Image: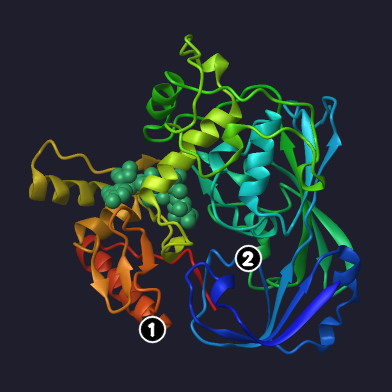
Amino acid sequence: MIKTEYYKDLTKMNTFGMKVKARCFMEYDSVADLVDIEFEELARPVLHIGGGSNLLFTDDFKGTVLHSKINFIEVLDDSPCHSEERSDVAIYVSVGAGVVFDDFCAWAAKEGLWGVENLSYIPGEVGASAVQNIGAYGVEVKDVIHKVYCYDTVEEEFVNFSVEECEYGYRDSIFKDPEIKGRYIVTHVVFALSREPRPVLDYGHLREAVAEAMSHSCDPRPRELGHPLAGGGMSHPCDNASDTVADCHFERSGSGDEKSLTPAMIRKVIIKIRKEKLPEPSVMGSAGSFFKNPVITMEHYLRIEAAAKAEHGPDYKVPHYDLPDGMVKVPAAWMIEQCGWKGRRSGGAAVYDKQPLVIVNYTGEAYPEEIIGLERRIIASVKAKFGVDLHPEVEHI
Ligand code: EPU
């Protein structure tokens, strides 16, 4: 079925909560419906959205907004697959583009499948995750993508891209290339998950947080593989994403050993961390990280470090990550905080007080101009203090 609405209010379809309208809005719930859409006849421009969690609408949208409701999770092979490219692969799971990404993470955790637990609670939908290469806590979605299936709106045919063909980078993919942007519509993504434990705990204090949670942890036993969107399966106290580690009544595992970890345990910890640091879109509008973390030369980093030590004392440590190519990634959050922006308000917009990489719709009534004004001033002050150019991660529409 295709649902078409004109002058559609998009306030609830963008997590920033910008009060804008789309001239035309079309929602389809199957691949057959997608094929029926006459792309040549749509009011232009055409924008395909997912959960609207990485967008800043700067005005009413004069063209057509498309949205997928292709919702399924299907295990393609529940016995170990032997892939020439990826010998570690155990289970291929095909997921519709319209599935809420965190619903997929919750499902994988319930099934005891490893791979997406660190990506828990990221807002957005599966189709957009494969375009944006979402990432958190040491994992990017490209690490678990096997293939991305799309509809080519130019050739009017179905195509698929291997993970290599997607040319993934930091929050980047071939689908964001200006030359082909909008041409391919993701219909579903095949993920390569694993039954073999493969916890990724090296990011920040994640290992400590997991160890702490394990001391009073609940071990949701994996069940037989099921199809959650088709119903079935027993529920578990940990199934509810709103639970925190603390309020889930786990039995003490005793061992404190990483071998007894489950994806569900890590998911719990990640959700707790995210809830502490990031605003809930349902409570305060935002689009998650507003800026990308900049990558600079080692020489540039050493100048920043010397200046920081001169300002804060010789023992001061500048957060940074050395990259394999000799470049250095410096958290934009640190630079924005150093420029004094943390918690500052400007009209209806504000820099989030617990994570300054996030700009929030503080009053719920912020105008796009207020968000953009704050963005410009942050960029200018980071450039003036550190000589670094910040680039928004959020797409301005
Ligand atoms: N920091 C500060 N002040 C703060 C907060 C952070 O100085 O108030 C510094 C700290 O040194 C901290 C570092 O920034 O160690 C990194 O902070 P954090 O771990 O919160 O991660 P991030 O680099 O700010 C990225 C992603 C997030 C993702 C987290 C966790 C980008 C643009 N953002 O943020 O993704 O959740 O790592 O992996 O890469 C998103 O994309 O919307 C998003 C939320």
Q: Is mark 1 within 8 Å of ligand 1?
A: no
Q: Which mark is residue 396?
A: none
Rendered position, 92 above or below 391: above
Q: Is residue 151 left or right of residue 68?
A: right
First in residue order: circle 1 vs circle 2: 2
What distance separates the C-alpha of mark 1 from that of mark 2?
25 Å
SS under mark 1: helix
Confirm whether residue 323 shows in the render: no
Residue at 71 percent across and 47 percent down: it is: 164
Rendered position, 238 above or below 380: above
Confirm whether residue 391 shows in the render: yes
SS under mark 2: helix
Q: Is residue 148 left or right of residue 235?
A: right
Identify residue for label 2.
176
Type of amino acid under label 2: Lys
**Quadrant containing the N terminus in the rendered view:** bottom right
Type of amino acid under label 1: Glu
Viewer-closest of 23 and 236: 236
- In the rendered picture of this protein, how many numbered marks are placed on residues? 2
Query: In the image, residue 71 lies at what x, y percent?
Result: 77, 56
Viewer-closest of 343 and 48: 343
Identify residue for label 1.
369
Query: In the image, residue 62 lies at what x, y percent?
Result: 63, 90
Query: In the image, residue 209 lies at what x, y percent?
Result: 39, 29
Residue at 88 percent across and 62 percent down: it is: 158
Residue at 52 percent across and 79 percent down: it is: 57
Q: Are marks 1 and 2 in contact (CB under 8 Å)?
A: no
Q: Is mark 2 within 8 Å of ligand 1?
A: no
